[in-house]
Image (tube, rainbow, N blue to C red):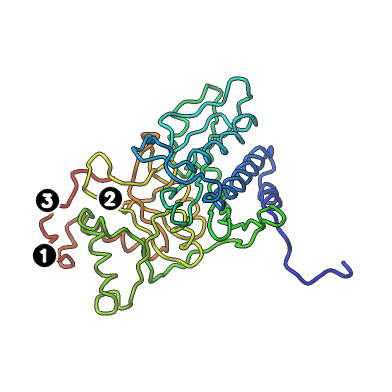
């Protein structure tokens, strides 16, 4: 075309999703429209989070959620936005939120669709008062039945997800998305009010010298994780023969975003504080959607003893251990778990952890 400027193509999130849809000749466009609605929710929530202090909407809402956590006022707003944008469209059969004990039905007066939406309305919301990046995580499954939706519709392994992503509310607002064909990042241009593709085909480096873990829980970790963190801490003086940096933000979206951009490994492993909670992160609202993003970017997402996306859910708010990020580090941590389970790790363990009966759980995931 004469006079065409030599600048990169401008690809909005709408254009990108339409292009992805072309790979599915039988697609009706319903999922495309659902993802548009989620992007719009991200814009609205971003507007509130960036002016939360000015709008006097910081702080606790005065009650706890189903997880026993104090609900923040921004949690309430984020959940309301997502629900309001999706309850009437005819695209969803049912919804579920990390903040709610039970599934969220579509009102009787509205048509029902063929998709199921799970979401964590505001991950890391306890950090909003100190201006740390927070985010919204979402997962989309197929309903696939003519019957009325039930909790069973949500209990699908992560590999059954048709789309997953998160919105990150930080210095810039980003939406990171996968529909099973790579992981792509979009940045919100506030001047035009749209998400623009800025990070196509994100790829997590296979190797890294950076890990993220909450060391305040060190006394509760299983020996394989103790071993891994100890070796990283020893750096060049030990078997790793290089120095590692440790990071911890306490906002999963922010941690994972760093890994998608420059690599790293994130661990929220099994611990022995509470036998009824073998992990701390929620399988359906956090681990599965983030696991899909990570795998589509070439990384691995594991419980330490197998892929997160292969776990068969058994409860709406099930928790599991999470280890994800750069492929070679996750593979190493999985190997340490196998060696521990088989008893082959004795030469590598400090004497403190040789009393296996104290640290080895009765059951494995």
Residue 69 rendering spot, x and y as whole percentages: 36, 40
- Say which residue appears at 33% left-offset and 54% top-offset: 268
**Up/down of 259 relative to 52, above or below:** below
Instruction: Quickly name the residue at label 1.
Output: 351
> In front: 348, or 127?
127
Residue 158: quarter of image: top left
Residue 331 rendering spot, x and y as whole percentages: 35, 61
**Up/down of 165 relative to 70, above or below:** below
Instruction: Tell me: 301 left or right of 348.
Output: right
Residue 121 rendering spot, x and y as whole percentages: 49, 42
Mark 3 vs mark 1, CA separation in Å: 13 Å
| Secondary-structure class at tag 3 | helix
Instruction: Quickly name the residue at label 3.
Output: 357
Looking at the figure, which quarter contains the C terminus? top left
Which mark sits nearer the N-terminus, 3 or 1?
1
Mark 2 vs mark 1, CA separation in Å: 21 Å
| Secondary-structure class at tag 1 | helix
Looking at the image, the residue that sits furthest to the top is: 108
> In front: 305, or 62?
62
Instruction: Quickly name the residue at label 2.
Output: 270
Q: Nearer the viewer, mark 2 or mark 3?
A: 2
Instruction: Tell me: 90 left or right of 206.
Output: right
């Amino acid at each position: 075309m004469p006079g065409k400027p030599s600048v990169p193509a401008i690809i909005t999130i709408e254009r990108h999703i339409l292009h992805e849809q072309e790979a599915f000749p039988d697609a009706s466009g319903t999922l495309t429209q659902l993802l548009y609605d989620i992007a719009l929710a991200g814009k609205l929530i971003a507007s509130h989070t960036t002016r939360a202090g000015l709008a006097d909407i910081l702080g606790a809402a005065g009650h706890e959620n189903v997880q026993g956590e104090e609900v923040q006022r921004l949690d309430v707003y984020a959940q309301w936005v997502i629900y309001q944008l999706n309850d009437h469209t005819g695209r969803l059969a049912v919804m579920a939120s990390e903040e709610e004990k039970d599934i969220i039905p579509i009102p009787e007066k509205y048509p029902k669709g063929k998709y199921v939406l799970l979401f964590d309305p505001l991950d890391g919301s306890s950090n909003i008062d100190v201006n740390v990046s927070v985010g919204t995580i979402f997962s989309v499954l197929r309903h696939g039945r003519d019957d009325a939706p039930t909790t069973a519709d949500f209990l699908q392994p992560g590999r059954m997800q048709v789309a997953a992503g998160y919105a990150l509310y930080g210095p810039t607002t980003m939406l990171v998305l996968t529909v099973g064909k790579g992981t792509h990042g979009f940045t919100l241009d506030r001047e035009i009010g749209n998400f623009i593709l800025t990070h196509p085909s994100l790829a997590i480096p296979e190797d890294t010298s950076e890990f993220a873990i909450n060391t305040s829980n060190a006394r509760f970790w299983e020996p394989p994780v103790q071993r891994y963190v100890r070796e990283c801490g020893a750096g060049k003086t030990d078997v790793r023969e290089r120095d590692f940096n440790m990071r911890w933000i306490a906002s999963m979206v922010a941690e994972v975003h760093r890994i998608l951009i420059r690599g790293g490994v994130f661990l929220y492993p099994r611990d022995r504080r509470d036998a009824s909670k073998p992990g701390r992160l929620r399988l359906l609202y956090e681990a599965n959607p983030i696991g899909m993003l990570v795998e589509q970017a070439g990384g691995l997402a594991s419980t330490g003893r197998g892929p997160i996306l292969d776990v068969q859910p058994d409860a709406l708010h099930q928790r599991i251990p999470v280890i994800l990020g750069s492929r070679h580090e996750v593979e190493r941590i999985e190997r340490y778990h196998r060696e521990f389970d088989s008893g082959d790790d004795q030469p590598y363990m400090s004497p403190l952890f040789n009393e296996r009966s104290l640290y080895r759980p009765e059951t494995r995931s």
